[in-house]
Every structure is written in structure tokens, then in C-alpha cells.
Amino acid sequence: MREIAEFIVTLFELLQTEMNRVRRGVSSVLNNFLFMIAGMMIFLGGLALLLYGAYLLLLYVVSPIGAVFIIAGVTLVLGYIVMSSAARQ
């Protein structure tokens, strides 16, 4: 009877240890995910400012509508390149 009680106690200790490990793993994944979201938001803000700067620069060369189309075309090409490279991996 004593062996069964020790087995149950050991089993619960193992379960508690594994739950702590899972909790730490989930916390780490959640932390990484939040940092990735924050990084993506900062990256997108920088990209928007870069595109706006390119638009303002193009206004000296072409009309406002032409500048919008050029920026949109370049953005579409870059987006396609990024998506196709991600699809290959």
C-alpha cells in the first residue's frame, strides 16, 4: 500500500514539474509573439514614412497622380517578391 501512495505522490510531483515547464514555455512563446507584433508595427510605421517620403520626392518630377501610381507599382512589385520568396521556403 505504501508503494502505491509513493507512486501517486511521485506522479503528482512529476505532473507539477511538467506543468511548470509548460507554463514557462507558453509564457516565452507569448512574450516572443508580443515582441514580434511590436516590431512589425514599428517596421510598418517606418515603411509608411519611407513611402511617403518617396511620394514627396516624386512630386518634383511627375504629377501627384503619377507619383501615386509609381509608388503603388513599386510597392506591389516588392510585396510580390516578398510573398513569392516566403512561399518557396
Image (tube, helix red, strand yellow):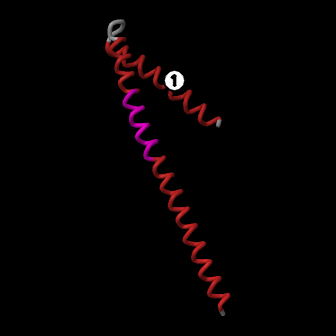
Q: Please determine whether, in this image, residue 36 is positioned above or below residue 60.
A: below
Q: Please determine whether, in this image, residue 49 is positioned above or below residue 37.
A: above
Q: Residue 88 location, x and y as percent? A: 65, 35
Q: For the view shown, which residue lies furthest in the bottom direction?
A: 1
Q: Which residues are magenta?
A: 34-46
Magenta region, main secondary structure: helix
Q: Residue 29 location, x and y as percent? A: 51, 52
Q: Is residue 64 left or right of residue 9?
A: left
Task: Specify the quadrant that holds the N terminus.
Answer: bottom right
Q: Is 26 a magenta residue?
A: no
Q: Nearer the viewer, residue 46 or 73?
A: 46
Look at 35% across and 24% down and name the residue there: 49
Count the labels in the image.
1
Quadrant of res 81: top right
Quadrant of res 37: top left
Disc 1: which residue: 77
Q: Residue 54 location, x and y as percent? A: 38, 16
Q: Please determine whether, in this image, residue 46 is positioned above or below residue 54.
A: below
Q: Is residue 63 left or right of residue 76?
A: left
Look at 37% across and 30% down and name the residue there: 45
Task: Specify the quadrant that holds the C terminus.
Answer: top right
Give the class, few, some or many, for how many residues have Cα within 10 Å of label 1's Cα (few <14, many ≥20): few
Q: Secondary structure at mark 1?
A: helix
Q: Nearer the viewer, residue 36 or 25?
A: 25
Residue type at mark 1: give it: Val
Q: Nearer the viewer, residue 53 or 58?
A: 53
Look at 40% across and 32% down and name the residue there: 44
Q: Residue 3 location, x and y as percent? A: 68, 87
Q: Is residue 32 left or right of residue 64?
A: right
Look at 35% across and 11% down and name the residue there: 57
Q: Please determine whether, in this image, residue 52 is positioned above or below residue 82.
A: above
